[in-house]
Image (spheres, helix red, strand yellow):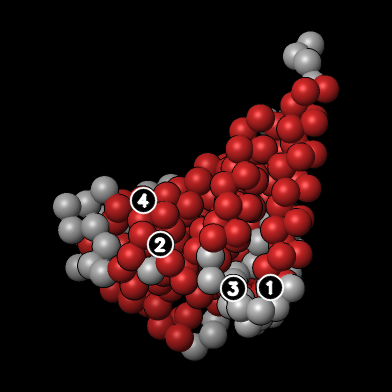
Amino acid sequence: MCEQVQVRHVASLVDADRFGEALSEAERRWSRLAPAGTQGRRILADSLRHVQHAYASAEQRAVALRAGRIAALAIDALEISPEGARSDQEAATWAVTLTELSGCLATEGHRGEGARVAARAATMWRRLCAARPTLTKHLTESLINQGECLRLSGQYVEAASVFAEAAATVRDAPGGGRGSRTALGKERDPAPAHSPEPRAQLARLLDRQALCAEQAGAWTPR
């Protein structure tokens, strides 16, 4: 009961836009271990998602990733629980949280962790996209973050493969739409299907793939 009260206190701080206090309270209690109860995990994941997004939108990504890491802990525990996500909407919310976290990790130089988080988000998006192809823009964003982290870590072969998948999702997806922030740049503006924006993004991804393939061929282990 005490833990539920503490989780709801964090949520109330977020509702009051007191994000710094909410983050401090969450870090003090759950920096390494998610709450025990399923409901508490859901509340914490949702609350810290909002904190992460607020700081990421303000370009304070070092703070955003602190919130995102706690949200990810709660999501980890929820994913492996018997109940799992209650709906595709909830699963999509988790995937959005992890996609944004991976972008923050990439920007702040946590490349290995960023690649792993982005891969988790991509796994979620692949399942969701099977039923709703319009969500492929989110899959692309998580793949971009994963590929960029791998590239910056010197894992050029793996990065080339990930960028190739990202290019394929853009090539095959319905055009346009707004996505979350990625490691390669700011949010994309909405674009209709006839817009050149998807073609420009496809060209950038193919260039990234080619660059990684070239670096993989030129790189030899010491």
Q: What is the distance, in whole Å, between disc 3 and disc 2 at their CAs? A: 15 Å
Q: Give the camera-side residue of 124 and 137.
A: 137
From the image, tell me which residue sits under label 4: 76
Q: What is the distance, in whole Å, between disc 2 and disc 4 at their CAs? A: 21 Å
Q: Give the camera-side residue of 66 and 156.
A: 156
From the image, tell me which residue sits under label 1: 187
From where the camera sits, is residue 65 visible? no
Please report the residue visible at 43 percent of the width from the left and 73 percent of the height from the top: 47
Q: Amino acid at mark 1?
A: Glu
Foreground: disc 3 or disc 1: 3
From where the camera sits, is residue 165 visible? yes
- First reached walking from the N terminus: tag 1 or tag 2: 2
Q: What is the distance, in whole Å, between disc 1 and disc 4 at their CAs? A: 26 Å
Number of numbered discs on residues:
4
Instruction: Give the side of residue 50 with respect to residue 7, left or right.
Output: right
- First reached walking from the N terminus: tag 3 or tag 1: 3
From the image, tell me which residue sits under label 3: 175
- The circle on residue 161 is none
